[in-house]
Image (spheres, grey):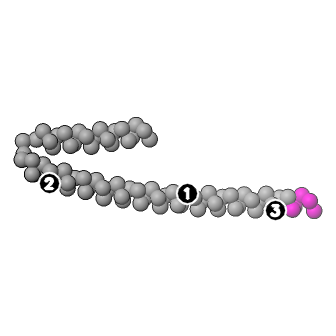
Amino acid sequence: MRSFFSLVMGLVLGAILGLLLAPTSGRKTRKKLRKRARKMQLELEAQTEKSMERLGEFKNNAEQFVEDAAKKVNGDNTYYTN
């Protein structure tokens, strides 16, 4: 996870440096930076939402697994005690 974060940060910093060193005016460069930052923000929000949905699904599946396992254990104990 740390290496992924480092990669993303490197890409972002490289893109920013590339824009800053490009032969365009400061106004155009700032406008491009704002647009790209907004786009990245929206993409990050979308990915976060997807991740939260997947985490919720995982939680529900884990809860169901634990419930099923508990039922089996309780059922097996009842079976052996009779």
The three-letter code of the residue at mark 1 reads Phe
Cα–Cα span, label 1 and label 3: 25 Å
Whichever of callouts 2 and 1 sits on the residue coming sooner in the sequence is 2
Q: Which mark is residue 75?
A: 3
16 relative to 28 in the view: left or right: right
The three-letter code of the residue at mark 3 reads Gly
56 relative to 12 in the view: left or right: right
Determine which residue is flagged by label 2: 31
Q: Is residue 17 above or below residue 70?
A: above
Tag in front: 3 or 2? 2
- Residue placed at 34% from the left, 39% from the top? 7
Q: Quadrant of the C terminus?
A: bottom right
5 relative to 79 in the view: left or right: left
> Which corner quadrant of the image does residue 35 belong to?
bottom left
Q: Residues within 10 Å of mark 2 (few under 14, many from 20)?
A: few
Determine which residue is flagged by label 1: 58
Secondary-structure class at tag 3:
helix
> Which corner quadrant of the image does residue 23 belong to?
top left
Return the x and y of residue 34 as percentages of the image width and height: 20, 54
Segment tinted magenta in the rendering? 78-82
- Residue placed at 87% from the left, 61% from the top? 79
Report if residue 81 lies within the magenta region.
Answer: yes
Secondary-structure class at tag 2:
helix
The three-letter code of the residue at mark 2 reads Lys
